[in-house]
Image (cartoon, rainbow, N blue to C red):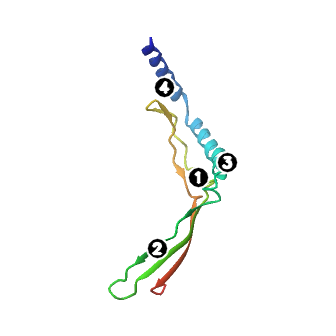
Amino acid sequence: MAGFRQLLLLAAVLCVAWAGSARDSNAFMDQILLQKMPQLVRSNSRLYPNVTIPEFKFKVESTRGLNRDLKVKMKEGAVKGFDTGVHRATDCNPPAPVAFNISVSCVLDFNGIYTTFLAKTEGDNL
């Protein structure tokens, strides 16, 4: 009897998953990205107004003695836009079952997320 219930549950999940459309997936992702995510990000002080990037250094080696090494120190790094910077780029695929879960697949646009730095340089003339 337990095997029959599991089979019936699996059949119901598959029917529900295949009954969804791309429009349903789009509506779901828009609700997450446009309504839920901004609230969640803004309520987390580690993500909003920005995520800080620790200071780091690197060196660009000279090329065949024609110039000097360029030393760069990157400071005050920040990533901004996590609250409103992600959007759907295209229509999503209809919901599909994946390993007993319902999966929604979309191409996302991250153009609203950006990084800022203060760069200090020493060495070759820029």
| Front position among marks 4 and 2 | 2
Quick one: SS at disc 4?
A: helix
Give the structural element (helix, strand or loop) at label 2: strand
Mark 4–mark 1 distance (CA, rounded to whole Å): 30 Å
Q: CA distance from mark 2 to mark 3?
A: 35 Å
In three-dimensional space, the C-alpha distance between marks 3 and 4, rounded to whole angstroms, equals 32 Å
Kindly identify which numbered label has been placed on residue 101.
none
Answer above or below: position of 84 versus 103.
Answer: below
Q: List the residue tagged with mark 3.
A: 39
Q: Which residue is mark 2?
A: 57
CB atoms at circles 4 and 2 under 8 Å apart? no
Q: CA distance from mark 2 to mark 1?
A: 29 Å
- Residue topped by disc 1: 86
Q: Residue at x 48, y 17 (%)?
A: 8
Which tag, 2 or 3, sits closer to the chain's start? 3
| Residue behind mark 4 | 14
Dot 3 amino acid type: Gln
